[in-house]
């Protein structure tokens, strides 16, 4: 039994005003994943596979890791199958490093991490990173101490990335991903995994503008329409847009959403198969949470629906349910590819139309001012013509409103 | 299903990352403070129904991520808001300077008559203070926005801030309603003046504006 104590009494979190009410409690013993409390805390031991099965799988994985190149190029399906079954905990960190290509990057640039750490770094980025260090998995043993080793390493990894890729710099969603990686491997390995995930797996997610995230929201919606039309209808009726419920799912690669056992299994697949695994998980969560007509009826509104999606029922997020349903989704590789192309084209068309509309607006307003000038007395005419706007390439619709006041 | 409230107000919390938007909202909705918060990614919301002069007012409060990169998705939610809380951190000069940018953001994206309020949060941390209360007040006067210093940790002025904003929205709403169906005896003297002021800068030429 765990002894419930307030954070203050553990002495881990520094000074605390007496009138501060602590709404969360922590235990003195971490769970098997290192959590003292919070949403991720899972006290009951996992029902594990038999020791002989685990041993057999470990041996298979070790053999595979020793012949990695050969397996990946000739027998990818085998790798995928083994990832889907779940990577044994003992080899997981190494397997992840290999799967995502972090190992290759590390071998190619053996001293780069240390060099990046020596660079000064953009002050704005450093500032942003520092503000987030104590706000990632605050109940995990690695990050619970203010300015403890875990938080220092988190800073290093995020800083190194921001120096390596100044175009992205630091984006807040990278912090939970980096912290999650640090729970499994040394900082330098976590760094190269983060590089690979940010630049390859979630390519474009962290770029300014968040265009890719919004497009992926459209793709998710379109796939939901096929796999769970009733849920899709419900979300559309109440105007529950993907940006409201799926932003954190996608940007943080579910690290803040799933219970730990499910998360590890989903990441086994994610690092092997890519971002579509996140889509599959999202589709299962949506269908599991709102698939039942009764649930939809109870969630009769935007807020009610969002509330439910923010805290999906535990059995929907449970390892076995989630993973089984994900693999059973009637979606092929081609379906994903096709929807990806369709939504990309759709967004491009919308953008073009928007640009054309803005151009027409500009032209119309210029003509209107010209006409007004022609009708106005001569003195006014001169002033108006001087003010007639010229089309600028990047003007937003609302900004190009021309109000000519007589002052 | 019977409606359990008389009014529904949509409010929005904006401001730099780490100024305490989520903590303020948590204090208001749960009356608690948690030092172990995680950074907000995207958009979140909380609901609280308050009693205002005998009316039940349901507040739907949207909490946004502060980092600039999120603005492309958060600004879409400015338009539907009736009230916006601009939050800065009194121990962080930059977050105060950025209030001007946030106001510009509101002007560009929110409806013109949105109610606003500036909150200087973390006022319990006096030793680390970088922005004096006077500077906060000065800024508020400059923009003609109400201002108050708050502490989500010590539960200082958080209730007051939300009640004030809600009351202002309610007053504005009732005034509008009154204007659209005027009662027998008209009592909207300053209402008319307000309208007049708004109409003033427009002229016949404003018809060439393309909206």
Image: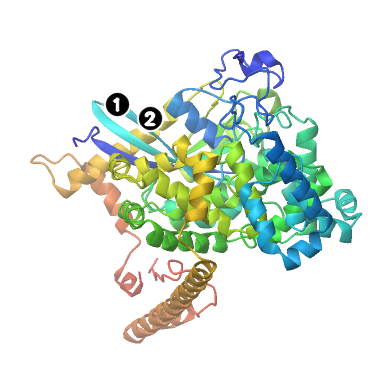
In this rendering, the label closer to the viewer, 2 or 1: 1
User: Could you say whether the residue bearing mark 1 is in a helix, strand or loop?
Assistant: strand
Q: Residue furthest bottom?
A: A374
Is residue A158 shown to the viewer in this render?
A: yes
Quarter-wise, where is residue B182 in the image?
Answer: top left
* Whether residue A399 is situated above or below residue A24 in the rendered picture: below
Spot occupied by residue A306 in the image (x, y as percentages of width and height): 40, 43
Say which label, 2 or 1, has the lower sequence index: 1
- Between the C-alphas of marks 2 and 1, the distance is 9 Å
Name the quadrant of the N terminus of chain A.
top right
Q: Is residue A157 left or right of residue B201?
A: right
Front-most of A220 and A153? A220
Q: Is residue A174 left or right of residue B76?
A: right
Query: Which residue corresponds to mark 1?
Result: B51
x 29%, y 45%: residue: A293
Spot occupied by residue B190 in the image (x, y as percentages of width and height): 26, 42
Query: Which residue corresponds to mark 2?
Result: B163
x 77%, y 34%: residue: A150
User: Could you say whether the residue bearing mark 2 is in a helix, strand or loop?
Assistant: helix
Q: Chain of mark 2?
A: B
Front-most of B170 and A93? A93
Is residue B39 shown to the viewer in this render?
A: no
């Amino acid at each position: 039994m765990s002894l419930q104590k307030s954070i203050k009494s553990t002495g881990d979190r520094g000074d605390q005003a007496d009138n501060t009410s602590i709404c969360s409690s922590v235990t003195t013993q971490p769970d098997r994943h290192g959590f003292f409390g919070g949403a991720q805390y899972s006290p009951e031991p996992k029902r594990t596979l038999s020791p002989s099965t685990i041993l057999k799988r470990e041996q298979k994985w070790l053999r595979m890791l020793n012949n990695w190149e050969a397996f990946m190029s000739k027998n990818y399906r085998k790798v995928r199958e083994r990832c889907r079954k779940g990577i044994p905990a003992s080899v997981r960190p190494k397997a992840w490093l290999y799967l995502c290509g972090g190992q290759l990057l590390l071998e190619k640039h053996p001293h780069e991490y240390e060099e990046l750490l020596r660079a000064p770094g953009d002050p704005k980025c450093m500032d942003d990173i520092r503000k987030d260090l104590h706000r990632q998995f605050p109940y995990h043993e690695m990050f619970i101490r203010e300015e403890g080793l875990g938080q220092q390493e988190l800073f290093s990894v995020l800083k190194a990335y921001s120096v390596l890729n100044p175009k992205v710099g630091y984006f807040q969603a990278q912090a939970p991903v980096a912290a999650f990686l640090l729970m499994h491997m040394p900082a330098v390995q976590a760094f190269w995994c983060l590089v690979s995930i940010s630049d390859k797996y979630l390519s474009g997610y962290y770029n300014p503008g968040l265009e890719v995230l919004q497009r992926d929201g459209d793709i998710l919606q379109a796939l939901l329409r096929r796999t769970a039309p009733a849920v899709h209808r419900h979300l559309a009726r109440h105007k529950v847009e993907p940006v409201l419920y799926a932003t954190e799912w996608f940007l943080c690669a579910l690290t803040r959403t799933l219970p730990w056992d499910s998360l590890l299994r989903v990441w086994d697949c994610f690092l092997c198969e890519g971002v579509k695994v996140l889509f599959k998980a999202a589709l299962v969560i949506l269908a599991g949470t709102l698939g039942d007509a009764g649930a939809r009826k109870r969630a009769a509104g935007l807020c009610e629906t969002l509330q439910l999606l923010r805290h999906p029922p535990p059995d929907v997020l449970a390892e076995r349910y989630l993973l089984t349903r994900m693999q059973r989704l009637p979606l092929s590789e081609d379906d994903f590819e096709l929807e990806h192309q369709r939504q990309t084209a759709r967004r491009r068309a919308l953008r073009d139309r928007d640009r054309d509309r803005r151009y027409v607006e500009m032209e119309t307003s210029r003509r209107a001012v010209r006409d007004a000038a022609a009708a106005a007395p001569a003195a006014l005419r001169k002033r108006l013509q001087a003010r007639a706007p010229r089309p600028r390439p990047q003007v937003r619709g609302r900004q190009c409103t021309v109000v000519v006041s007589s002052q | 299903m019977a409606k359990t409230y008389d009014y529904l107000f949509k409010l929005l919390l904006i401001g730099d990352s780490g100024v305490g938007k989520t903590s303020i909202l948590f204090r208001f909705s749960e009356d608690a403070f948690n030092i172990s918060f995680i950074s907000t990614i995207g958009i979140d919301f909380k609901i609280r129904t308050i009693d205002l002069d005998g009316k039940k007012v349901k507040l739907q409060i949207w909490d946004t991520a502060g980092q600039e990169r999120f603005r492309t998705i958060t600004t879409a939610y400015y338009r539907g808001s009736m009230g916006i809380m601009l939050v800065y951190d009194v121990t962080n000069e930059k977050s105060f300077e950025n209030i001007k940018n946030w106001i510009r953001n509101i002007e560009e994206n929110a409806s013109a008559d949105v109610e606003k309020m500036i909150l200087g949060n973390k006022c319990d941390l006096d030793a680390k203070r970088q922005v004096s209360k006077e500077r906060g007040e000065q800024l508020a006067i400059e923009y003609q926005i109400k201002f108050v210093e708050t502490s989500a940790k010590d539960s200082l002025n958080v209730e007051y801030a939300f009640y004030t904003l809600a009351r202002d929205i309610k007053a504005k709403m009732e005034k509008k309603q009154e204007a659209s169906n005027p009662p027998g005896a008209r009592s909207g003297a300053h209402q008319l003046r307000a309208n007049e002021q708004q109409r003033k800068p427009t002229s016949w030429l404003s018809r060439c504006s393309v909206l």
